[in-house]
Image (cartoon, rainbow, N blue to C red):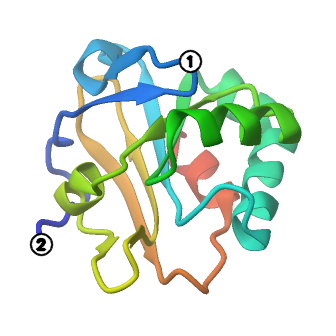
C-alpha cells in the first residue's frame, strides 16, 4: 500500500462529491487543501469529528483552505450526511478505496479508510500528514495549525 509523507507531492485523484460533481485534486492548485479520510458517514466518531470541523470551519476558511472529506460511502449517503450535520464542505465518494489506498489509509480487512488528515500547500506539496487508526479520534486543530 502506498503512503504519503510530508514534503512529497500529493498524489492526484478524481472523485465525485455529494452532488455527483467531479472533483480533481490538481484543479485546486493555487490554494491549500485539507483531506480528511474517515471510515463512514453517520458513525458516532466520524460524526463528532465532522461536527468539530464544521464548528471551527471559519479557521479553515480564513486560512484559504478547501476541506474535502473522503470515505467509501456513496454520493447519496454523503448528501444525506452533509445535510443532516450542516456541513459546508464537500464529501467525496471513494467506494472502492482506490484513493485511500493511494494515500496509505485503506483498511482492506474492514473495507474502510482509516483516519488520515493531509494538508496540501498551494504548490501541491504535503505539509502535514497524520494517520490515526479507525478507533483513534483526530484533532482537527493540528491541521489548522499546519495551514500556518
Q: Which residue is mark 1?
A: 19
Task: State the image coordinates of residue 30 (x, y, percent, origin top left).
Answer: 34, 13
In the image, residue 65 lies at what x, y percent? 55, 27
First along the sequence among labels 1 and 2: 2
Q: Residue at x 36, y 20 (%)?
A: 23
Indicate the secondary structure of the residue bearing disc 1.
Answer: loop
Identify which residue is drawn at 81% across, 31% down. Answer: 83
Rate crowding at label 2 as few (under 14), some (14 to 19) or many (20 or more) other CA atoms within 10 Å: few
x and y, in percent, of residue 31 in the image: 42, 18
Q: Secondary structure at mark 2?
A: loop
Q: Residues within 10 Å of mark 1 (few under 14, many from 20)?
A: few
Which quadrant would residue 46 be assigned to in this image?
A: bottom right
Tell me which residue sits at (56%, 18%) in the image: 19
| Left or right relative to 91: residue 37 | left
Q: Quadrant of the C terminus?
A: top right
| Quadrant in the picture for the N terminus | bottom left
Residue marked by disc 2 = 1
Q: Is residue 5 visible?
A: no
Using the rendered view, name the quadrant where residue 5 is placed.
Answer: bottom left
Q: Is 107 positioned to the left or the right of 1 in the image?
A: right
| Residue at the image position 21 percent from the left and 62 percent from the top | 101
Q: Nearer the viewer, residue 111 or 6?
A: 111
Is any part of residue 39 visible from this angle?
Answer: yes
Q: Position of residue 111 (x, y in %)?
A: 37, 73
Residue 7: which disc? none
Amino acid at each position: 500500500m502506498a503512503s504519503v509523507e510530508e514534503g512529497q507531492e500529493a498524489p492526484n485523484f478524481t472523485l465525485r462529491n455529494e452532488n455527483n460533481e467531479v472533483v480533481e485534486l490538481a484543479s485546486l492548485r493555487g490554494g491549500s487543501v485539507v483531506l480528511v479520510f474517515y471510515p463512514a458517514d453517520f458513525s458516532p466518531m466520524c460524526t463528532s469529528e465532522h461536527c468539530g470541523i464544521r464548528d471551527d470551519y471559519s479557521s479553515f476558511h480564513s486560512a484559504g483552505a478547501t476541506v474535502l472529506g473522503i470515505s467509501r460511502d456513496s454520493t447519496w449517503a454523503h448528501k444525506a450526511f452533509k445535510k443532516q450535520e450542516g456541513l459546508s464542505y464537500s464529501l467525496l465518494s471513494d467506494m472502492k478505496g482506490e484513493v485511500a489506498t493511494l494515500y496509505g489509509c485503506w483498511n482492506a480487512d474492514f473495507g474502510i479508510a482509516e483516519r488520515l488528515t493531509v494538508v496540501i500547500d498551494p504548490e501541491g506539496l504535503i505539509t502535514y500528514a497524520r494517520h490515526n487508526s479507525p478507533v483513534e479520534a483526530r484533532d482537527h486543530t493540528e491541521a489548522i495549525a499546519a495551514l500556518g
